[in-house]
Image (spheres, helix red, strand yellow):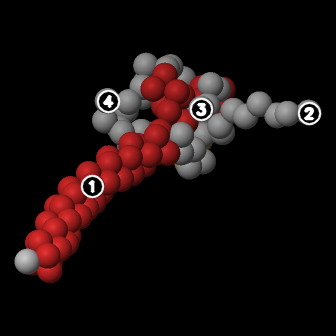
């Protein structure tokens, strides 16, 4: 009788470990996936733009300047005479502004 109680107790304990472990694993995977998505989004926001940039639909010089960290787009691109004269497909030079530490 004692052996039967012991094996029932071990079986119950094992069953709890399996159920609890599966639940924790799925929560961990879900958390890891969400964290990964957030991290990728943050990294892409801070990703420097290429030196040659092609304007996309809906972009303005202001949004490109913020996105690429280049506050001097007009000065660096003499072919842009007016800041409102920006259209999809326009090729511009980007030089990200960096604060140098001395």
Q: In the rendered image of this protein, does residue 11 appear above or below residue 48?
A: below
Query: Badges 3 and 1: C-beta atoms under 8 Å apart?
Result: no
User: Circle 1 is placed at which residue position?
Assistant: 24
Mark 4, residue position: 58
Side of 45 where 59 appears, left or right: left
* Labels 4, 2: front one: 2
Secondary element type, mark 2: loop
Separation of disc 1 and disc 2 at Cα?
49 Å
Q: Earlier in the sequence, mark 1 or mark 2?
A: 1
Q: Name the residue under label 3.
A: 69
| Up-down relation of residue 7 to residue 33 (above or below) | below
Up the image or down, 74 lies above or below 18; here it is above
Mark 3 neighbour density, 10 Å: few (under 14) some (14–19) many (20 or more): some
* Residue 68 sits above or below residue 22 on the image: above
Q: Give the Cα separation between the discs numbered 3 and 2.
A: 20 Å
Dot 4 falls on a residue whose secondary structure is loop
């Amino acid at each position: 009788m004692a052996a039967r109680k012991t094996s029932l107790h071990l079986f119950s304990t094992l069953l709890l470990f399996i159920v609890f472990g599966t639940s924790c694993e799925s929560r961990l995977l879900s958390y890891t996936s969400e964290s990964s998505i957030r991290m990728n989004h943050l990294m892409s926001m801070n990703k420097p733009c290429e030196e040659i940039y092609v304007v996309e639909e809906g972009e303005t010089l202001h949004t490109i300047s913020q996105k690429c960290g280049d506050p001097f787009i007009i000065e660096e691109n003499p072919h842009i005479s007016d800041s409102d004269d920006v259209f999809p497909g326009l090729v511009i030079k980007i030089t990200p502004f960096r604060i140098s530490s001395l």
